[in-house]
Image: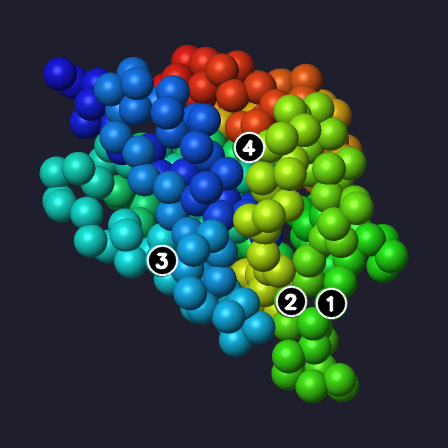
Amino acid sequence: MGMAREHFVLVHGEGHGGWCWFKLRWLLEGSGYRVTCIDLAGGGVDPTDPNTILSFTHYNKPLIDLLSSLPEGEKVHVILVGHSTGGLSVIHAMHEFIDRIRQAVFVAATMLPFGLQTDEDKKDGLPALPEEEVELTFGAGPDDPPTTVSLRHEFQRDRLSQQSPEEESILASMLMRPWPETAIGTACFEGDDERLNRIKRVFIKTERDHMLDPQQQDSMIKKWPPSEVLVIDTDHCPFFSAPEQLFNLIVKSL
């Protein structure tokens, strides 16, 4: 069975974990694909305290370790899917494993070839959240930048999943963790975008996104055009609000 050789590696965004993909995983596995839903450091059930994660390398280590450990023959069949800041994890992996990744799919995800090199990059690629909507933790001391950020409970549904079933927003609110802001903000990569362009890139734009504004998404698409742009009329979390549609778009893009 040729199809089963494809191995989807699903990479969550800030505050989430591998758990957020449960519906997409069920749909992909039901179609015979192999699926791994990674927990980045301090995400999902990973035991690391996110306040101790100060570098992007540390944060993204679970993804890099997974890709390093795959048997030779399989590497070419890896399809990375990143959501939100999970796009930075995907880009990092593309730089490290240019020959092992068949395709990268960005679901309302940060798609910048060298990560967050400039303020302009941060403006395009990171959610801009008003102060009153977030809680900061200053784990390195009051004079240092915050080590983690989390979205206050009462703003989570409107920012992330206003079109999703309410019970999923509740589940997410129980599972979400503060994310390592310092670590994510230092995601900068060296390399050559021509080389990166050997990997097919697909961007899935979320039209009703309150977290990563559609204009931010457009700006990244325009600056580094992917092979394909697909549009889904959803909130920031289509894996909750439109899983079948998301599944169909991803599988058709292969």
First-in-chain label (4 vs 1)? 4
- The residue type indicated by label 4 comes to Val
Question: Which mark identifies residue 62?
Answer: 3
In this picture, is 223 found above or below 129? Answer: above
Tag nearer the camera, 4 or 2: 2
Question: Counting other residues with Cα less than 10 Å from the Cα at mark 1, is it few (<14), some (14-19), or many (20 or more)?
Answer: some
In this picture, is 27 found above or below 144? Answer: above
- The residue type indicated by label 2 comes to Thr
Residue 166, image x, y percentages: 67, 29
The residue to which callout 4 is attached is 107
Residue 9, image x, y percentages: 35, 39
Residue 70, image x, y percentages: 19, 47
Quarter holding the C terminus? Answer: top left
Question: Which mark identifies residue 148?
Answer: 2
Q: Are marks 1 and 3 in contact (CB under 8 Å)?
A: no
In this picture, is 77 found above or below 31? Answer: below
Residue 11, image x, y percentages: 45, 43
* Residue at left offset 24%, top offset 19%: 32
